[in-house]
Image (spheres, rainbow, N blue to C red):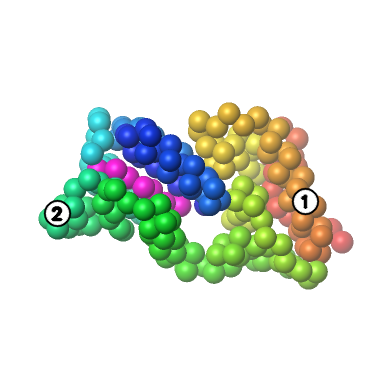
Amino acid sequence: MKLLLAEDERELSGAVVRVLKHNNYTVDAVYDGAEALEYLTYGEYDGVILDIMMPKADGLTVLRTIRAQGNNVPVILLTAKSEVDDRVEGLDAGADDYLSKPFAMKELLARIRAMTRRKNDVISTYTVGNLTLNPKQFTISADKGEIRLSGKEFQMMEMLVKNGNVLISTEKFMESVWGYDSEAEINGVWVYISSLRKKLQSIGANVNIKAVRGLGYRLEKSDD
């Protein structure tokens, strides 16, 4: 699951990013409202953690802008403000939840789970051939059993399942799973693809990951 964190306090941002990554989230961190709008315009996210008091564009402006553009990504607002009117303003602007600083990391994680639950509740599982992908459990299953995937493995498999026969480039995997600012090397995608292929084989899935040289990868049913 991929999140965008927009928080201008860099020390707090770093602490939140570490906790989220430890809990198998992929995170892009930005430090002002203009960056947040840019990332939300060109990237796809499962949820946004948005500070209200930011330079260049405040969180409420960012929120109102993306809602006006038709972007319904779930959003949690972070702010030092705690007055009822401030909370109401944020919720009326289209926020899904509101968390006042200082906050406990456990509470933030619980709010994120609640915020993103609505998306997962719409479709509980995805199926291709005899393969079932479970977004709630981070698992894939087929005739010979079930395996829990790591965070990045799950995100890659989810992209493959959702995109059907559409090729996904290595660069798209890097952008979506590792994030814009990642220093990971591009051959890391191949490492994860190789791992996923082995896991698909081990559970007896009748689908495999097809590589098209120079173009990307797609999920397709096996010939046998």
Between residues 83 and 141, which one lies in front from this camera angle?
Answer: 83
Q: Left or right: 30 with respect to 201? A: left
Q: Left or right: 118 with respect to 173? A: left
> In the rendered structure, does residue 112 fall within the stretch colored magenta?
no
Kind of residue at disc 2? Glu
Q: Secondary structure at mark 1?
A: helix
Residue found 38% across the figure and 58% down from its top? 107
Between residues 165 and 137, which one lies in front from this camera angle?
Answer: 137
> In the rendered structure, does residue 50 fall within the stretch colored magenta?
yes
Q: Residue furthest right?
A: 224
Between residues 72 and 17, which one lies in front from this camera angle?
Answer: 17
In the image, residue 60 lies at what x, y percent?
Answer: 23, 45
Q: Which residue is mark 1?
A: 197
Kind of residue at disc 1? Arg
Residue found 71% across the figure and 44% down from its top? 192
In the image, residue 159 lies at what x, y percent?
Answer: 60, 51
Residue 95 visible in the shown view: no
Q: Contact (CB < 8 A) between labels 2 and 1? A: no
Specify which label sits upstream in the sequence, 2 or 1.
2
State which region is magenta.
43-52
Q: Which residue is mark 2?
A: 83
In the image, residue 68 lies at what x, y percent?
Answer: 27, 48
- Determine which quarter of the picture holds residue 126: bottom right
Which numbered dot is residue 37?
A: none
